[in-house]
């Protein structure tokens, strides 16, 4: 275990893609979509042996702080940072970096979304250690590139530039591939995505980052000076009674921008490790289906499903005592939660969000 | 009101067609599928002004007697006749006839399934009065023929024979058409049904009957002598403490046969009134849809439905607080009840029964 790592778990997310199980008040990271642990809990569980709880921070919306504390009772209460407003990832990570700098000096930050599925944990640790070794004491901003397994149109892509030598200090990581990132690419259309996959030099942008706190803070200062001007002075108030009030004043004025747009796409020293682990951002019901049990007809289900001439459906029941019967239907998403039921065509999964946002009291 | 009418409401039914709202223990006649009254209650409500409660009998499975009493508290308790076993309609109606004969002499029986929808009540009364007037003191077995509104394959048909003069005694019924029934036809295939509709001389077999008790008992004696031998002796035990035991002994040995197969198709003196009312046997979810509210896209719903590019669906929520969201789906049946959810293609509605019967604890 490297003593200088600090994990920063970003638990944002609006919750419309997993309606009706997730709602504005219950975004997906707080839900036990698989087994009994929530995605947030699984993200922190995955750090075991890599980063200790006292060096694990969670950034979330202020209203979710009690929920995060309840789900992660072994984390020090002060490690849950509540954002008074949603200001996108650049502000969230910069805020975490300010706290890191104050509490831990210049640690290597491992920034992780709270709602990804990564397996196995050992390979994830190996990749973090390799990236951290390369980022430590350098000005490199590191990310993980995921080798595409299909031409996804829902992810951004990284174009790999020249390979770089992995750090020598950690022999266990010798076989991991490091690249300079030549370019960030927006979510492509289908044809472009197919081209990327054929090309072989494109990776999915995982949204995970590894860098020294000072490296990142310098990048914020250079590329997002407003963020720096508003958030850096908060360092003086970390762990003081003035924190909440100062944070509320400063944070509300920070521009809304993602760390990808605001920093990564502008910075020069961006590198990636080709991930040796399997990864999913579980972006919706169809992605979740990959993690559910399947019957012979390809129906992926959680809950008791009785099917007659029904194939390729995704059925998810929040309550295990639910029974769903399917007759003659194909390629549907059927979800049950409380008094809410969703029936959608799989190829229209992207539109669930649209419908839910228009529903009174359900949207983000 | 004709003082000699007795209504016999047959509340059988297994409940698989309306799964998941109906189950083996909650067949459709006991459910408030429309508004707040159950189909059974609506059937008895419809008799108001035609047959008084003390002359209204209900025949049901013995296990449903408490449920029927609870739903029809204004009926004398002794008017609910519990069948110890299911022996189909010939036995149920013959049993009712035996009770009728004993209690009421030789009334005109109006035999009505408990799960049909008929409107308006006034026209129904007019038709009953006309058929009763014709059946009274004659050996005629009367039924109602329903003019087909589409080439239904789920109903039996009656071929109308020569028209007969309606009874003169009731001027209000003068315009109703009476026919001898030339033939009973089984549920036809689509092509045959289309032929029937074009022909104009075919009517749906409504399963409602009007006849003098003695006429029917004579028909039972002639066409179903086993029924007569087993059930007629029960007359001596009506309203005595021995009733239940005697009934249990006799009923278990009665052959299972419907009144259509066992009597109507063999009897010669079968007549029909062309029904002046609208009628549905509400045979399943698609039939029920005709009675639900429709949105502009033709989604018929009970419950709160949010639809995006969804058309022609039937949504039924037993609990009015349920919310169903539909995205991109067409011509589905979506039903919510308790912990049970059905999603079926409308054109596969007939197969719901098959699936449910295979489910442990759900089938009939």
Image (cartoon, coloured by chain):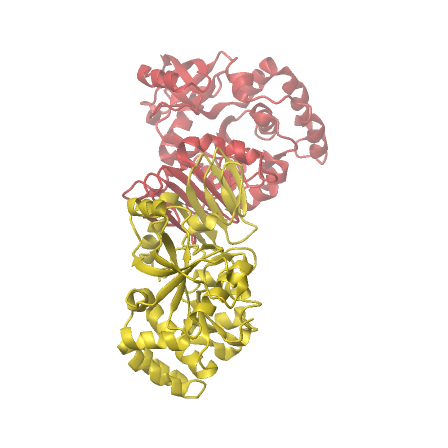
Chain colours: A yellow, B red
Q: Position of residue A116 (x, y in %)?
A: 46, 59
Residue nearer the viewer, B201 or A68 = A68
Number of numbered discs overlaid on the protein picture: 0
Quadrant for the C terminus of chain B in the image: top right
Q: Position of residue A231 (x, y in %)?
A: 34, 80
Residue nearer the viewer, B138 or B21 = B21
Relative to B68, does residue A129 appear above or below in the rendering? below
- On the question of residue B10 being in view, the answer is no
Instruction: Determine whether, in the image, residue A228 is placed left or right of residue A119.
Output: left
Quadrant for the N terminus of chain B in the image: top left
Instruction: Determine whether, in the image, residue A95 is placed left or right of residue B266.
Output: left
Relative to A1, does residue A236 appear above or below in the rendering? below
Q: Quadrant of residue A283?
A: bottom left
Instruction: Determine whether, in the image, residue A151 is placed left or right of residue B27.
Output: left
Q: Quadrant of residue B310?
A: top left
Q: Residue at x 43, y 83 (%)?
A: A102
Q: Position of residue B52 (x, y in %)?
A: 49, 37
Q: Quadrant of residue A131?
A: bottom left
Residue nearer the viewer, B30 or B289 = B289
Relative to A165, does residue B33 appear above or below in the rendering? above
Q: Position of residue B171 (x, y in %)?
A: 33, 25
Relative to B11, does residue B97 appear above or below in the rendering? above
- On the question of residue A230 being in view, the answer is yes
Residue nearer the viewer, B354 or B170 = B354
Q: Residue at x 54, y 62 (%)?
A: A172
């Amino acid at each position: 275990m490297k003593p200088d790592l600090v994990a920063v778990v970003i638990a944002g997310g609006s919750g419309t893609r997993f309606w009706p199980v997730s709602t504005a008040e219950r975004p997906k990271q707080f839900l036990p979509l698989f087994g009994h642990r929530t995605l947030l809990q699984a993200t922190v569980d995955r750090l075991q042996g890599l980063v200790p709880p006292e060096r694990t921070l969670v950034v979330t919306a202020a209203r979710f702080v009690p929920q995060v504390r309840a789900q992660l009772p072994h984390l020090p209460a002060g490690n849950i940072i509540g954002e008074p407003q949603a200001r996108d990832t650049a502000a969230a990570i910069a805020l975490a970096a300010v706290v890191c700098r104050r509490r831990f000096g210049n640690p290597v930050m491992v920034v992780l979304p709270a709602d990804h599925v990564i397996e196995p944990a050992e390979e994830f640790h190996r990749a973090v250690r390799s990236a951290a070794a390369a980022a430590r004491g350098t000005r490199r901003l590191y990310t993980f590139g995921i080798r595409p397994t299909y031409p996804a149109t829902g992810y951004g892509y990284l174009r790999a530039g020249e390979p770089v030598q992995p750090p020598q200090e950690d022999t266990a990581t010798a076989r991991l591939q490091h690249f300079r990132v030549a370019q960030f690419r927006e979510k492509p259309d289908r044809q472009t995505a197919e081209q990327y996959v054929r090309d072989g030099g494109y990776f999915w942008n995982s949204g995970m980052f590894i860098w020294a706190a000072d490296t990142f803070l310098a990048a914020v200062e250079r590329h997002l000076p407003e963020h720096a001007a508003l958030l850096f002075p908060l360092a003086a108030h970390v762990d003081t009674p003035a924190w909440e009030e100062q944070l509320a004043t400063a944070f509300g004025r920070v521009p809304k921008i993602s760390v990808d747009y605001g920093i990564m796409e502008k910075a020069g020293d961006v590198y990636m490790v080709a991930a040796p682990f399997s990864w999913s951002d579980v972006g919706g019901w169809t992605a979740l289906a990959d993690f559910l049990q399947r019957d012979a007809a390809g129906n992926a289900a959680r809950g008791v499903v009785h099917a007659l001439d029904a194939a390729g459906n995704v059925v998810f029941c929040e309550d295990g005592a639910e029974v769903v019967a399917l007759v003659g239907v194909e390629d549907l998403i059927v979800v049950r939660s409380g008094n809410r039921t969703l029936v959608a065509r799989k190829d229209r999964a992207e539109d669930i969000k649209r419908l839910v946002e228009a529903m009174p009291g359900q949207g983000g």
